[in-house]
Image (cartoon, rainbow, N blue to C red):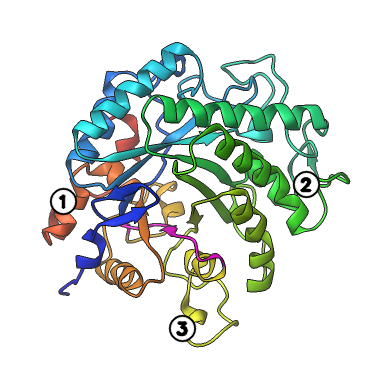
Amino acid sequence: MILNIKPLFEPYRVGHLTLRNRIVMAPMTRSFSPGGVPGADVAKYYRQRAENNVGLIISEGTLIGHPAAGNDPKVPLFYGSEALSGWERVVREVHAGGGRIMPQLWHVGSMRRPGDLPNPEAPSVSPSGLTKPGKKVAEPISAQVVEALIGAFARAAADAQRIGFDGIEIHGAHGYLIDQFFWSGTNQRDDAYGGDIVARARFAAEIVRACRAATTPDFPIVLRFSQWKQQDFTARLAKTPAELAAFLQPLVAAGVDMFHCSTRRFWEPEFAEDGDQRERQMNLAGWTKKLTGKPVITVGSIGLDTDFIETFRGKGAGSEPQHLQRLADMIAGGEVDLAAVGRALIADAQWAVKLEQGKLSEFVPYSREVLAQLT
């Protein structure tokens, strides 16, 4: 199959930020930062992708300054002088390699178990104390804790701009804290942060607004969201385009510059029964762009020939040519703007270069074994 992947390598501009192409490195937890401090090996890892033609890197999830933000002592922090100095080195290396980088700001919420490091004494926090529908692990958090969490995200945003990052991504997907507010299955609050889909978006909107106030107006803010959760792959925030529009509107009003729309398989339609023929083929990112007018990143098993979930079961994964052509066509047609690649870029730092040169047979296939090393 002869691919026309030229659209993937056209420049793109969002705000003040110009990207050399449409390839994004998706945020992928690596747990190679002992004590929460990214070292020289982490900086080298990201620089290698930048040097090999990845236009934008979104870092692995980084923990905001809250005691219960994380559940792994080797996940990097995004607070404290030592961790921020480590991230400043990462930024310098990525820029030296010709790339751009944003940190993903993260709080795991009730996905944290009692006793988890790095702060075993800290209780888990979530909107209603639920980790999934019917499973209570803590008490609902107070309005004062909500306010403190919003402040922690804003401080991280300010630090990101101060040390030279090119923007931020706020992690609002996959069943973690912000998504626990989004999802009716984990948000049973009866205050201003609970209720219908618009009210459940308020927490994230206030985070975005606080991050915008803590940074300059031209500093890009990306929000990642998903319908699916790790607690329930079939979960849906919005069952119709109208519900999705209602959910997204307060986030746009708060100041989101770009949406990162996480799906398990980017090539699958989101609302196959709605709209005209073209709309019935659009994925979550395509609908998000149509409904908001904002730039979007599509993601979901790009560069794999199997669902990324299958990789957890030990199945290897290469690249499926027809999916890559579909991706290029989506960008060429203006349906989506950027494409985030995860596991394929973990396995092969040269993936983007090989794709541009048409050397698909030289891709290093992904396998679980590559997670054991940072190369």
Q: Position of residue 243 (x, y in %)?
A: 69, 68
Is residue 63 in view from this perspective? no
Choose between 318 and 290: the one closer to the eye: 290
Question: Three-letter amino acid code at disc 1?
Answer: Val
* Mark-to-mark CA distance, 3 and 2: 34 Å
**Is disc 1 surrounded by few (<14), some (14 to 19) or many (20+) residues within 10 Å?**
some
Residue tagged 3:
278
| Foreground label between 3 and 2 | 3
Residue at 42 percent of width and 41 percent of height: 27
Amino acid carrying label 2: it is Asn
Using residue 335 as the reference point, say whether residue 234 is left or right of it: right
Local SS, label 3: loop
Is residue 76 shown to the viewer in this render?
yes
- In the image, 118 versus 240, the foreground residue is 240
Disc assigned to residue 353: 1
Residue 57 horizontal/vertical position (percent): 33, 42
What is the span of residues highlighted in magenta in the rendered image? Answer: 292-304
The quadrant in which residue 302 appears is bottom left
> Which quadrant holds the C terminus?
top left
